Image (cartoon, grey):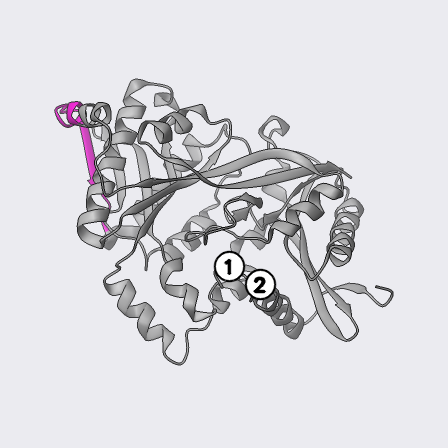
Amino acid sequence: MADLTIEPIATARERKEFVDLAYRINAGDPNWVPPLRMEAMELVTPGKNPFFEHADVQFFLARSGGRTVGRISAHIDRLAVAMDPVQGMGPGTGNWGLLEAEDETIARALIARAEEWLRAKGMTRVLAPLSMSIWEEPGQLTLGFDHPPTVMMGHQPERYNTYIKALGYTPAKALRTYELDISKQFPPLIQRIVQSGEKNPKIRIRGINKADFNAEAALILGILNDAWSDNWGFVPFTDTEIAYASKKLKPIVREDLIMIAEYESEPVAFMMTLPDLNEVIKPMNGKLFPFNFIKLLRWLNKPRVRTMRVPLMGVRKKLQSSRLASQLAFMMIEYIRRNSVANYGASRGEIGWILDDNQGMIAIADAIDSHVNKEYVIYERAL
């Protein structure tokens, strides 16, 4: 492709062009869920997404024959660079993501341009794809192309995985989601563990108070920052990001789907569950107007869904690997399961993502008869 050019975006029109391209390239994929365009634009706009407060970001567009044929982001998360290299990030590590390309030649050129930008910034290693932070849509889909992703999960063409591996990228970490039938009770052993916890006066499992949601969100993310602080890929949430996440999640959270576990009156664990918003927005093709916003408002007022997703859970480090931690997890899962079925008509649950070497969470997933339904791989390569 002799006339292929790759240039950094410089105008608002080009930012819109960057966002719009994903809708055209993925239009023929029945399992791609078009995000709401306002959300997609916010993700890549400085001043809207707080990720830009601690990251250097450059977006690129590929053009050929007067057409836009590809896109990519290159970014350096300064918080990630400051982490211990043992945890996967660390000094010299940059990222690229948001890849869309019409063919392999274009994808190769885009990735090479992102690597060139990272190298010029002093990076010596790349972890990718990350679109854009580890908390948004990390990894390339490698398993589960045959069904749509749930809320806040990504979906990329299988050919991208081929392109990435052909460039010499090797897997750094696999992230997996687990699905299960929540319309039936958990195995007898799990029921006994839950019943035992219910008899313990030191344990209290409660839903959140949405009237005080900002404080509840700060509490939850405080537990998360402690619980996940030793995990591979961990980057702490900033105060601005906590406030931003609270604002974005508030419309879809439900008091009976997010549980906080207290032990001796201290909040020590949480489990966040979200009704699968993707089920209602998938037919909208990213557009709220003129009438889709009415459908969305009606759904938000009384969600009825097939799937519930558990995107986040955590137990404070001082309790991890203890029997109490597992008991609290099973109690929260069971209470959420009951509420999901009774109050929202759900029949399917999805847990994750879960790191491929997180033995504690994998054991919990196995104990409730769930199985892997999607896998995302974060690749690495020396620059």
Q: Which residues are magenta?
A: 195-209
Q: Earlier in the sequence, mark 2 or mark 1?
A: 2
Name, please, the residue furthest toward the top: 322
Residue sitting farthest toward the right = 2
Amino acid residing under circle 2: Asn
The residue at the far front in this view is 146
* Residue closest to the far bottom: 290
Location of residue 254 with respect to 355 vertically, above or below = below
Mark 2 closeness class: few <14, some 14–19, many ≥20 residues within 10 Å:
some
On the image, the x and y values in percent for residue 109 come to 78, 55
Point out the image quarter for the C terminus. top right
- Residue 259 lies, in percent from the top left, at 26, 40
- Residue 100 rendering spot, x and y as whole percentages: 65, 59
49 up-or-down from 201: above or below: below
Per the model, the C-alpha gap separating discs 2 and 1 is: 7 Å
Kind of residue indicated by mark 1: Trp
Q: Residue at x 41, y 78 (%)?
A: 289
Q: Which residue is mark 1?
A: 32
Residue ID for mark 2: 26
For the N terminus, which image quadrant?
bottom right
Q: How crowded is the residue under tag 1: few (<14 C-alpha within 10 Å), some, or many (20+)?
A: many
Residue 170 on image: x %, y % = 69, 35
Evaluate whether residue 69 shows in this view. Answer: yes
**Res 9 seen here:** no
